[in-house]
Amino acid sequence: MLLLVGCSGGVLDPKGQIAAEESKILVNAFATMLVIVAPTILAALLFAWWFRASNGRARYLPDWVFSGRLELVNWGYPLLIILFLSGLIWVGSHRLDPFRPIVSSNEPLEVQVVSLDWKWLFIYPERQVATVNELVLPIGAPVHFSLTSATVMNSFFVPQLGSMIATMPGMVTQLYLKADHIGDLWGLSTQFSGAGFAGMRFSVSVKSKEDFARWVDDTRRSACDLDQAGYAALLPESRNVRPFAFRSVAPSLFAEIVKGTLSPQNASSEQAGSLAPCAEAPR
Amino acid sequence: MNIFGNLSWEAIPWNSPLPLIASAAVIAICLALAAWVTLAGHLPYLWREWITSVDHKRIGVMYIMLGLVMMLRGFADAILMRSQQAYAFRAQGYLPPEHFDQIFSSHGTIMIFFGAMPLTIGLMNFVVPLQLGIRDVAFPTWNSTGLWLTATGALLVNISLIVGVFSRAGWLPYPPLSELQFSPDVGVDYYLWALLISGVGTLVTGINFVTTLLKMRAPGMGYLRMPMFCWTALASSLLIVAAFPILTATLAMLTLDRYLGFHFFTTAGGGNMMMFINLIWAWGHPEVYILVLPAFGVFSEVISTFSGKPLFGYRSMVAATLGICIISFLVWLHHFFTMGAGGTVNAAFGIATSVIAVVTGVKVFNWLFTMYGGRIRFATPMLWSLGFIVTFVIGGMTGVLLAVPPADFLLHNSLFLVAHFHNTIIGGVVFGVFAGIAYWFPKAFGFRLQEGWGVAAFWLTLAAFYTVFIPLYMLGLLGMPRRMQHYDMEIWRPWVLAAMIGIFLFAAALICQVIQLVVSIRHRRLLRDETGDPWNGRSLEWATSSPPPPFNFAVQPNVTGEEPYWEIKRRAIASRQNEGRYEAISMPRNSATGFVTGFFATITGFAMVWRIWWLAILGLVAAYAVFVWYAWRDISEEEIPAEEVARIDRIHRKRRADRLAPHSEASETA
């Protein structure tokens, strides 16, 4: 059953370096615990069956209540397993800390992520373009995400790239990911955030370096600008939003979102409703 | 200003038929029951013997009834969620998000606070004083107040079904979503007041049991002679006393945010949502041990009794229980590894979490060695215990998996997590409660539950559990988050449908339980327990009659070892011991304090939800007046004369002697 799940697009079918390492730890930890769990289950069933009252051949030991040697096993065996796991936890937590940069000779990419009600905004500050509900990454590039929320808490997660991380208003979390295979993936929010939560899916496409550059150029031909007005139009609640792109991004927009100067309580919604900066923007 | 605050006819969901019909049906059933009770003249009996009762046994039974009814209510939510997800593939299903979000919020809230908690506390109430060989708990009227405040909370949550809405922010209302800005309706307020009020009830119960267990044991019963269930009840009560104030304080802060514009957890004004998440889990993680430790106690009793052996490694078990008690306070951060605390912090909490697996492992091994060399009888309680060992070990394993931060980064908030905690709560707490109910039912009512339907219920529950939750584990591995109202991923669909089938199996299992109860009541004469000791038990609750007299023990037992009743039996003096030394017994008088306090607390809670300030003040003043009236009482106890005690005890002795005479040799020399 695990194998079935392993080849069909879940967390056991990694398409990036971080996900690969994490799913390896997942499988290793699972195997380590089977060493203790499987015999325990077997012993439980075996003892219960053999010592059934109707089995005359089983020895009855009504006063056998303590054994120092067995107590040693009782405490020692799980302790050994957990000691081993603790090593795994200690090393894994540090090496795969989402804030820790990925060492790579490839050109890095910056992406700023903002969770909104109920969609994702991805800003490429170096390229000065942005997208909604569509994340495009060049293959092999170590991507540095800075994440925040313009609404309630959400969690950014691309199962096949690994490491989900919370997005929180007024705070910035960091995440480093690297995609190693060209293709289409998907991501979503894993932290419940209100009525439109289920529709917060975004597409992730991993492209070759050239295709990525071409995609950036295409995006520049979009009709939308992510200036103050363009951002204000994103703030009202909307559900199941189709992906679209912005050809330009106001500088320091992300910093202002984090500071909260542009957050929903400051942007009046009727003003946002009357603005139509972009034909492609969702209503 | 409206004298009814924000309350108006619009609060009733006229245009959503589902809650309307459901609550109409429930109200009709309640009215019919009330009418029947009144017309048949049972009301005075109910009032005298149950509602105002301060007898720990009756309070325990009422807690369990409350827990079972609320569990059915929470299960109805589960059916709705599973069927909604089965329909909502590339579609909206039949529940819009506004409903679906209330349903998963109320499912969690009801199952934990008003299902599992009353069931656990109910068992503690019924069993602990009997096992300690005493006549009541330390604070009997407080005990009754705790029950009725819990019932108040349950009632408020259910009122929200028909008047207004329930919270849409999950069973733990994370800000900022639960703040006024994002949840402006009364849903979160219902949640807050229900838990603030029932939280007081739980705290009172915790204090009561800590006092009882520390101060009121039968003569000779040192700490290391207490039955295992008492130890786990003590650990659980200590956790309640330490953890529930955190919950109350945290929810009070959120209440201040919502009602008075404070900024503890808001986005603006210097608030910090992470503080709420830390605090709520500082309560939340001990909470799961508050629930599961007494269940561990039940299994210890059941496995030992049905193996015909004392518990293996008793002292080791005590150490493990207290170990869990302490470590459970050191692991809360594992609920949010993905908030970016950094490698060292995550690793420290991950390791602390897996250490719990060591002490739990010790317990599992000791249960195994208790069975080793036993003569195991597979009665229903024992079946639940075996099902528990197998299921819980798997749940523990997935728990440790989630305690490994890099693995948690892939699985947090997914259905894998959901499957994990159901695995431990159903496999641990619910199986434990069912084992406990089947085990102590004859003690409470004087007749056993019918075996056949109980066995059927067990196997169906086990099958249902795996049919629902293996798919949920798989869905988690496939990246499906919890709380999805709809989805459009092809790869998830088969597993979602499989889980849907499982929920029907669960329903079948529940029906078996109901049938079991009905059949048992109808055949109660055949199932009668005359001896007070239907399972060949080992602790003191089996020394008295079934059901026990109001004073539990005609003569207070004298304890000389770890398994007091087993020793009495071995010396074969059970039916003769202590005859002729009866004395008058003083028992606490029944009191309406608890019920009336609960009544006014309901009014206050409801009024606060709808911001009907005058009514809230009125309710508070009235509740306080009840307390003053109680504190000024002149007579708090009534005496049962020695002759009456002797009369009741002789009946029990005679019955037991009659039953035991033919086969006493066989069972006692075994």
Image (cartoon, rainbow, N blue to C red):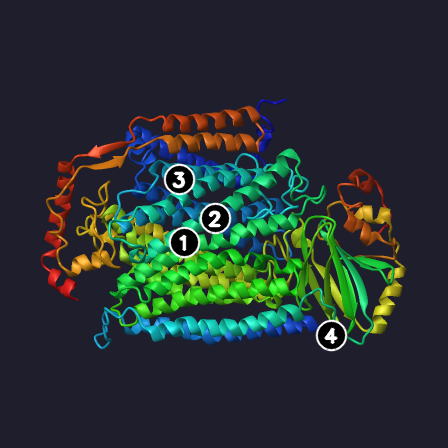
The secondary element bearing badge 3 is classed as: helix
Residue under numbered circle 2: B242
Dot 2 falls on which chain?
A: B
The secondary element bearing badge 2 is classed as: helix
Mark 1 vs mark 3, CA separation in Å: 20 Å
Residue found at x 35% / y 39%? B139
Residue under numbered circle 3: B147
Left or right: B642 with respect to B133? left
Mark 3 vs mark 4, CA separation in Å: 59 Å
Position of B621 relative to A60 (above/below): above
Residue under numbered circle 1: B235
Amino acid, disc 2: Ala
Residue A107 visible somewhere in the drawing: yes
In the picture, residue B31 is in which quadrant? top left
Mark 1 vs mark 4, CA separation in Å: 52 Å
Residue under numbered circle 4: A181
Residue B471 visible somewhere in the drawing: no
Residue found at x 34% / y 73%? A68
